[in-house]
Image (cartoon, rainbow, N blue to C red):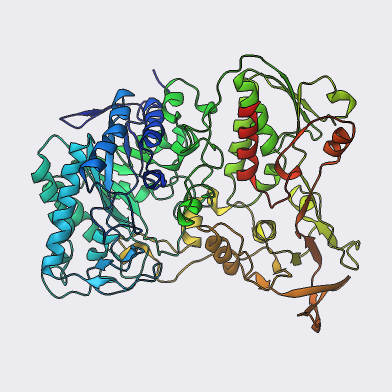
Amino acid sequence: MTNYPHLLAPLDLGFTTLKNRAIMGSMHTGLEEVGDYNRIAAYFAERAEGGAALMVTGGMAPNEEGGVLPGAAGLFTDKDIANNRIVTDAVHAAGGKIAMQILHAGRYAYNHKCVAPSPVKSPISPFPPTELDEEGIEKQIADMVTATLRAREAGYDGVEIMGSEGYFLNQFLVTHTNKRTDRWGGSYENRMRLPVEVVRRCREAVGPDFIIIYRLSMIDLIPNGSTWQEVVQLAKAVEAAGATIINTGIGWHEARVPTIATSVPRGAFTWVTKKLMGAVSIPLITSNRINNPETAEGILAEGCADMVSMARPWLADGHFMRKAAEGKSDQINICIACNQACLDHTFSMKLTSCLVNPRACHETILNYPAVDVAKTVAVVGAGPAGLSTAIVAAERGHKVTLFEKDSEIGGQLNMAKQIPGKEEFWHMVDYFRRMLDVHNVDVRLETEATVAALVEFDEVVIATGVLPRDTGIAGQDGDNVVSYVDVLRGKAVVGETVAVIGAGGIGFDVSEFLTQKGESPTLNRDEWLAEWGVGDPADVAGGLRPEGPQPEAPARSITMMQRKAKKPGAGLGKTTGWIHRAALKMKNVQMVAGVNYEQIGPQGIQVSSGEARENPRWIAADTLVMCAGQVSFRDLADQLQAAGRTVHVIGGADVAAELDAKRAIKQGSELAASL
């Protein structure tokens, strides 16, 4: 008897069987564009070994005009097919199955050759699309069929036809982007003609024994999106056309509703898939913010879907399902949905990885082999840098002692986890705690390491973190001035009117913390849906409530300010910064940029403008919270180096940056791999 009977149950598709109910959803990693197919093969093979029932590749372009970017990967030549065969052979040797996603970007293509149903420019691309004529539409269909045939020739077990997230096929479905009056526009029967025809023609081309997944947008989250009646109509037509499975797509890329960020509740949109259960007879996959076996099992047990799609959780831990099946779910490295090393990298033209697992997409480069000679290793500081070093070094066979002056591990993660919408950080710390135990790290809490205590160790790693930066503002020692550290650790009394000094990541976090009343909406799906104005597509087309977002009133009145004249939060994540700005705007937080801090008094803070320090004025505040940066805390490292000892300095002690867990964990893991 297993703890996850629904999740681990096989799924019979007739001509083939999937070994469990978890697929690894499509992610664009950039590996295909690197061109090292042995590296791509290693990435997918590890996840096949890790128990994924079926994996879906990143989007592969069916033609030049459909590529997300110029030079986007696709199966265009015999060499492309042979290269992809390296990947599929490795996956099959590891006992897995893999489908290729056919992704036509339509007007989302960052390409002057982009095409669409109508010449309606996307808000996320600078290139206006060319409206396709009848011959052009036929070419797109034929190219998708050709891509399907080439996928089969390359050894793929199936394809996923991308029909959601606002891409090409989705653009034909809604009047928002389809203004045509011919047989491809107008009535819904006409607008859905293209995706149905693509599925039908692809099925005819490959025969019955090949997986065809259709990714269907079940809630567009844009104005003039699909109605629920249209969603059901399309699902039935896609089934009749020959789809094996229907996967869930949530929201267009231009939607102003978060769909996969950490502040989105786990399984926030599974109710949408559940509405379609029973309307079709082929299996349905649900998706978005499913990141642990318990959540996945509950979703399946509730009858929301036949399968769950998890994408980024497979970056966080390539052995997700194997660990679940072996009763080691507490050893699964959990995806915290931060986007920092995956989507942010993708949209910055960098290779994807993972904040909590820097080996992701680097499986041939970063590995943790067992050591020939075990060393004694001292790690000072149990923040993310120190924790990753200690765990990887111990995993490799070193004898590791971890010193931490506080009473718990986690360092600045213990402040991050207090922020509404960042509850996943609790689970991140829990994972670290469990892995310290699994790998027998000697953890010494409430212990301040000294030079004398470190003499006997072969290797010493200093990961002592950061301290808040002294702003030097006149009056900063007043009783009404507190540090972000004391606020987030519950040691400060904060008034009803607050000035936050600093509008970087910490300033935003503190402002979100101080505006929140009661429980975070991330922990209550209905409250979260109301906050962002999400409704039932059966009631309103596209699933956007006509009354708009309905956030809870803020707990405090906050003004956030910064010295820099640029937009507050400019350094936030590329794909999540807009969410934080929107969330604070909904809570009426005022953001002031380009100010000089003149002085702090009992009534608040006096600021001025520009180099000439013009327009001095007081901003009233009961409490002022200092969030104006950090400095490295490396006193012990300096003492050791002065004594002639070679030490490794990592994380915030090396470079003081705002809660940069991505850099800290990567640096710690790479150091431990080299010891």
- Residue at 70%, 51% (x, y): give it: 657
Query: Would residue 211 be seen by someone viewing this image from the given angle?
Result: no
Q: Is residue 335 toward the left or the right of residue 406 in the image? A: left
Task: State the image quarter where residue 541 is shown.
Answer: bottom left
Q: Is residue 150 left or right of residue 375?
A: left
Q: Position of residue 497 (x, y in %)?
A: 75, 68
- The residue drawn where x is 71% and y is 75% is 594
At horizontal 34% and vertical 61% (from top left) the residue drawn is 220
Residue 449 in the image, given as x and y percentages of width and height: 84, 30
Which of the two residues, 444 or 2, is positioned nearer the viewer here?
444
Q: As displayed, is residue 505 above or below residue 307?
A: below
Quadrant into which the N terminus falls:
top left
Q: Residue furthest bottom?
A: 615
Of residues 494 and 33, the one nearer the viewer is: 33
* Left-right relation of 201 to 515: left
Above-or-below relation of 417 to 483: above
Q: Is residue 378 visible?
A: yes
Q: Position of residue 137 (x, y in %)?
A: 15, 64
- Seen from the viewer's position, the closer of residues 578 and 380 is 380
Count of all numbered marks drawn on residues in the image: 0
The percent coordinates of residue 347 (x first, y second) are 46, 56
Q: Taking 502 as reference, is 351 above or below it?
A: above
